[in-house]
Amino acid sequence: MISNLMDWLGEKTILIVDDTPENLDVLKGILSPHFRVQVATSGRVAIKIAQSANPPDLILLDVMMPVMDGYEVCRLLKAQERTRDIPILFVTARSETEDEIKGFELGAADYLVKPVSPPIVLARVRTHLTMLAHRRNLEDLVKVRTAELMIRNLELEETRQEVIRQLGRAAEYRDNETGLHVVRMSRYVYLLALRAGLGESEAEQLMIAAPMHDVGKIGIPDHILLKPGKLTDEEFAVIRTHCRIGFEIIGDQRSELLNLGALIALTHHEKWNGCGYPRGLAGEEIPLVGCLSAIGDVFDALTSVRPYKKAWSVDDAMGLIVQEAGEHFDPRLVPLFVGLRPEIVAIMERYQDRMP
């Protein structure tokens, strides 16, 4: 273990900075048998060496030098990201407390007082190189652990999103064998959200959460949900409960994504004129996510085959959306949706229901 440590230290480079040749010779004589040694006779040369492709691992820096003293050299090196982590040990005849405080405030790691003691010089240099190695190992370990944590978080997020998608499809499969309604609808909502001014991240979250809008259908009996004919008033009252059922199924969660899904489930059947359900909200009382989801949901429902109807044409469906601006739908969103027609048609063609 000790041998390996000495071998490792022997590969390190020490830069000695001093304008006095005799001082350079003394320090070089102490350090050269144990380390690679570079020398500089001025602060400017020292900075140039430190910024080179092969910077030193540690610097022994004289304080009293002409033109640029050691304090200024230290300040400049610590101000640059590339050189700020190189340990600097001041070598000086000054031993006043004020001088040491100034050096430490500038970022120096230690002080060596002239005339230097060879054993102390070697011990201090080895100590600071070892401390630097431990710090870098710790930083590398933190980076590795952080990367691993990010990967795990991404995997968890992907899993959560997949569960959300399947939860949305679970209800849809009951009256649509392919479950592609939630795929198309969520993409319509995504495009409309972007066109309405939401950021990319917000629109993506909305696209992921939107498939949960009809999860409450799980609680609707088949003889009502799959009825091919017109629903009675009593049966339609049961259908209307799917909004609250969906909201309760998702519940109040710590996940913002799930809470967004719950809000969409609760509000996607509200109408701008206040005649929607379950709460009869009107105008801007309706959350934007509910307004966005309402348009995407209705358009796809109109253009899809259902047990009780044939698919509408795009023209007819768009016409109804326009007609219902200010009644069913937020009048500010309708022209934006109509302007997305080419993108909407592309989604319809890509995600067509495959009927048996």
Image (spheres, grey):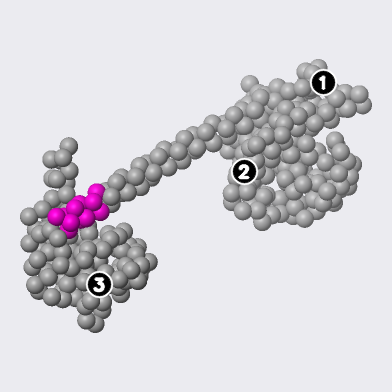
Which one is earlier in the sequence, the residue at label 1 or at label 3?
3
* Vertical position of residue 44 compared to residue 296: above or below: below
Quick one: 280 or 321, which is closer to the camera? 280
The residue carrying mark 2 is 205
User: What secondary structure characterizes most of the magenta part?
Assistant: helix
Residue 23 visible? The answer is yes
Q: Which residues are magenta?
A: 119-130
* Vertical position of residue 35 compared to residue 105: above or below: above
Specify few, some or many for label 1: CA neighbours under 10 Å numbering under 14, 14-19, or 20 or more.
some
Which one is earlier in the sequence, the residue at label 1 or at label 2?
2
Measured in 3D between alpha carbons, the distance from the residue under mark 1 to the one under mark 3, in whole angstroms, is 93 Å
Q: Is residue 129 magenta?
A: yes
Measured in 3D between alpha carbons, the distance from the residue under mark 3 to the one under mark 2, in whole angstroms, is 63 Å
Task: Give me the disc on residue 94.
Answer: 3
Task: Give me the disc on residue 224.
Answer: 1
Q: Which residue is found at the position 75% from the left and 48% from the top?
A: 288
| Residue 236: x %, y % from top left | 87, 27
Q: Which residue is found at the position 66% from the left and 30% from the top?
A: 168
Q: Which residue is found at the position 26% from the left and 63% from the top?
A: 111
Which one is earlier in the sequence, the residue at label 3 or at label 2?
3
Of badges 3 and 2, the one in the foreground is 3
Type of amino acid under label 3 = Arg
Give the quadrant of the N terminus: top left
